[in-house]
Image: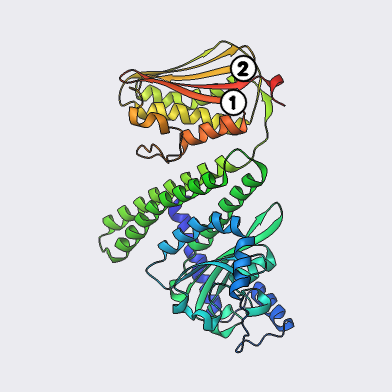
């Protein structure tokens, strides 16, 4: 099924869902949450809001400082993507207390409706909603318009996604907008954000290799770069809405798909970087040969000679998927850097207690101004790239595989990347 058909099906399901809500055909999830609201003795037209005192809020923020810091760039980006409409993007702790907030809460009711920093959005206080119900069910939820038990929220649509680390709920994210601005894609976007946050939390809890401030810097940069295709998608969507020429409309949609694919690549790269992986004893030569076979057609087309010089059969401990992705990144960078004929040579050889892997190209060398920052995230983005490839290689080899990676380059001639891995007997 192509992307257009997937999008069409999503919208069809969305229109059916909204139609059912308007016709009062309550979903089971709504009926069950309303039953809980009745058990909590809530009054749908007279909710009693709970607020933290200024000192209590400071304590909550201090207790959840790591979660807040990690979530900040996500909240910022989500809010910016909604800046043309009334909205709230919020972060709650595991008890439903709002500990960070973006948007225009005053346009949706503000403090008078319990929509502010330091308020409690658990089901037992304000009824079913994105935060409270997501925390209760431990899964993403959508509460649309009159599905809210609290009548004051009947004009809003909200989505919520729990944040879970090592099986423990730490909090939840929520996006709330007026019903006329509700969009089915936001549930997927918010779920992706929560998944990325959970991956970062897992990494922080299981590794000391990257400082927390460096981690947050990477996330901030990543989210900043993700905003660019989001802005393009938004603009193309608006142009598509006002266009009357079918050729132009198709062009807008084609470019939207391209930008969405770009975002998906960036998110995938980030998740691959932070997801902990197991290592196993393997011979890397067959893995490298797979990469060569996959790139040989494009190399033949571009008149690039791609060769593999295997001088050893030593075993090392690697994660097959991540190691293969690292070699793919190096080969792909070399291929993309060559406009005409050239050569890429991959080699393996034994160096005492380590295995040395080399990827050499004749692409012309790395610009001098890029050499000191080449392995930093987003340092170098060619057309069609994510800017995470070489960072992913560096992180995977040095952190996950306890190896080394470096390069030698000569302007006008080419570049050689080297990966050194401990032999299987040397890495426990």
Q: Earlier in the sequence, mark 2 or mark 1?
A: 2
Q: Which of these two is toward me, 160 or 16?
A: 160
Residue 170 placement (x, y as % from top left): 66, 60
Q: Look at the picture and state if 389 lies above or below 368.
A: below
Q: Which of these two is toward me, 349 or 13?
A: 349
Specify the farthest residue to the left.
Answer: 245
Q: Is residue 140 visible?
A: no
Q: Look at the picture and state if 94 lies above or below 216.
A: below
Is residue 373 left or right of 61 when viewed as pictured?
left
Q: Confirm or deny contact between disc 2 and disc 1 (CB under 8 A).
A: yes
Identify the residue position indicated by label 1 in the image: 403
Q: What residue appears at the point 69 percent right and 66 percent down from the top-left corner?
A: 137
Identify the residue position indicated by label 2 in the image: 354
- Mark number displayed over residue 105: none
Residue 49 placement (x, y as % from top left): 61, 82
Is residue 102 left or right of 52 when viewed as pictured?
left
Residue 165 placement (x, y as % from top left): 67, 53
Q: Is residue 109 visible?
A: yes
């Amino acid at each position: 099924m192509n992307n257009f058909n997937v999008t069409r099906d999503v919208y069809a399901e969305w229109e059916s869902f909204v139609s059912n809500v308007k016709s009062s055909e309550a979903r089971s999830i709504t009926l069950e949450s309303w039953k809980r609201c009745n058990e909590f003795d809530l009054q749908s037209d007279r909710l009693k809001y709970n607020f933290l005192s200024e000192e209590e809020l400071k304590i909550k923020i201090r207790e959840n400082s790591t979660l807040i810091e990690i979530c900040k760039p996500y909240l910022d980006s989500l809010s910016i993507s909604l800046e043309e409409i009334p909205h709230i993007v919020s972060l709650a702790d595991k008890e439903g207390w709002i500990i960070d907030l973006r948007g225009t809460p005053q346009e949706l009711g503000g403090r008078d409706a319990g929509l502010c920093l330091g308020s409690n959005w658990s089901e037992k206080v304000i009824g079913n909603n994105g935060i409270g119900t997501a925390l209760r069910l431990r899964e993403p939820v959508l509460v649309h318009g009159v599905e809210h038990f609290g009548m004051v929220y009947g004009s809003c649509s909200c989505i919520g996604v729990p944040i879970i680390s090592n099986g423990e709920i730490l909090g939840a994210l929520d996006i709330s907008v007026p019903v006329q601005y509700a969009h089915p894609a936001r549930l997927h976007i918010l779920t992706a954000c929560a998944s990325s946050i959970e991956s970062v939390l897992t990494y922080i809890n299981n590794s000391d290799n990257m400082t927390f401030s460096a981690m947050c810097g990477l996330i901030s940069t990543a989210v900043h770069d993700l905003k660019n295709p989001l802005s393009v998608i938004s603009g193309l969507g608006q142009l598509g809405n006002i266009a009357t020429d079918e050729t132009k409309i198709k062009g807008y949609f084609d470019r939207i798909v391209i930008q969405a694919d770009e975002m998906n690549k960036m998110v995938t790269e980030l998740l691959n970087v932070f997801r902990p992986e197991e290592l196993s004893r393997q011979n890397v030569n067959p893995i490298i040969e797979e990469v060569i076979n996959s790139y040989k057609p494009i190399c033949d087309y571009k008149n690039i000679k791609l060769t593999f010089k295997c001088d050893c059969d030593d075993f090392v401990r690697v994660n097959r998927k991540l190691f293969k992705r690292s070699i793919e990144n190096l080969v792909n960078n070399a291929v993309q850097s060559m406009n005409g004929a050239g050569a890429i040579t991959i080699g393996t050889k034994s160096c005492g207690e380590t295995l040395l892997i080399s990827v050499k190209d004749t692409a012309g060398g790395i610009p001098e101004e890029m050499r000191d920052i080449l392995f930093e995230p987003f340092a170098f983005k060619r057309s069609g790239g994510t800017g995470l490839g070489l960072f992913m290689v560096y992180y995977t080899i040095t952190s996950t595989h306890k190896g080394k990676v470096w390069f030698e380059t000569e302007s006008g001639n080419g570049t050689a990347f080297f990966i050194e891995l401990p032999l299987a007997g040397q890495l426990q």
